[in-house]
Image: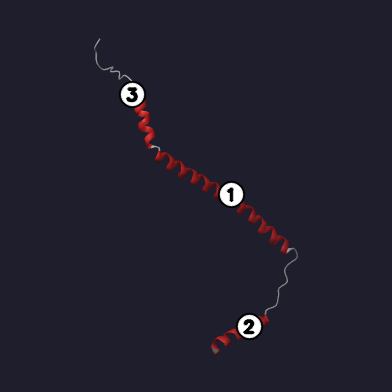
């Protein structure tokens, strides 16, 4: 337990020698402008990712809807060939 207390005391005493630095004139303004410029691009990136996610979900939804409509193909085939007459153009019968 004494070792932990000693480490804590050394750490706290090392902070006593630290002095604040003086920033150059206009540093805070330039810093905030840089942060706002970065936030500007991240907003567009987030919108682009959201749009891609919406399109991906729409594609998945459409894919599942098309896979469930397999009965529609057979219905169309039956409706087309039910009353159609098959023409044979290869025979030379008259």
Q: Position of residue 47 (x, y in %)?
A: 58, 49
Q: Residue furthest right?
A: 25
Q: Is label 2 in a helix, a strand or a loop?
A: helix
Which badge, 3 or 1, comes first in the chain's sequence? 1
Residue marked by disc 3: 82
Residue 5 vertical position relative to residue 80 in the rendered view, above or below: below
* Residue appearing at x 58%, y 87% in the figure: 5
Which badge, 2 or 1, comes first in the chain's sequence? 2
The disc label shown at residue 68, or none? none
Classify residue 20 by image quadrant: bottom right
Residue marked by disc 2: 12
Query: Of circles 2 and 3, which is in front?
Result: 3
Local packing at callout 3 (Cα closer than 10 Å; few below 14, some 14-19, many 20+) is few
For the residues labelled 2 and 1, the Cα–Cα distance comes to 45 Å
Which badge, 2 or 3, comes first in the chain's sequence? 2
Q: Residue furthest top?
A: 94
Q: Nearer the viewer, residue 26 or 15?
A: 15
Which quarter of the image is occupied by the C terminus?
A: top left
Local packing at callout 2 (Cα closer than 10 Å; few below 14, some 14-19, many 20+) is few
Residue marked by disc 1: 47
For the residues labelled 3 and 1, the Cα–Cα distance comes to 52 Å
Q: Position of residue 64 (x, y in %)?
A: 43, 43
Query: Of circles 3 and 1, which is in front?
Result: 3
* Residue appearing at x 65%, y 80% in the figure: 15
Q: Position of residue 82 (x, y in %)?
A: 33, 24
């Amino acid at each position: 337990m004494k070792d932990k207390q000693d480490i804590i005391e050394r750490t706290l005493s090392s902070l006593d020698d630290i002095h604040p630095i003086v920033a150059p004139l206009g540093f805070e303004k330039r810093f905030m402008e840089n942060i706002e410029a970065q936030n500007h691009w991240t907003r567009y990136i987030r919108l682009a990712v959201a749009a891609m996610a919406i399109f991906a979900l729409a594609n998945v939804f459409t894919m599942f809807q098309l896979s469930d409509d397999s009965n529609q193909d057979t219905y169309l085939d039956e409706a087309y060939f039910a009353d159609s007459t098959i023409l044979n153009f290869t025979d030379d019968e008259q």
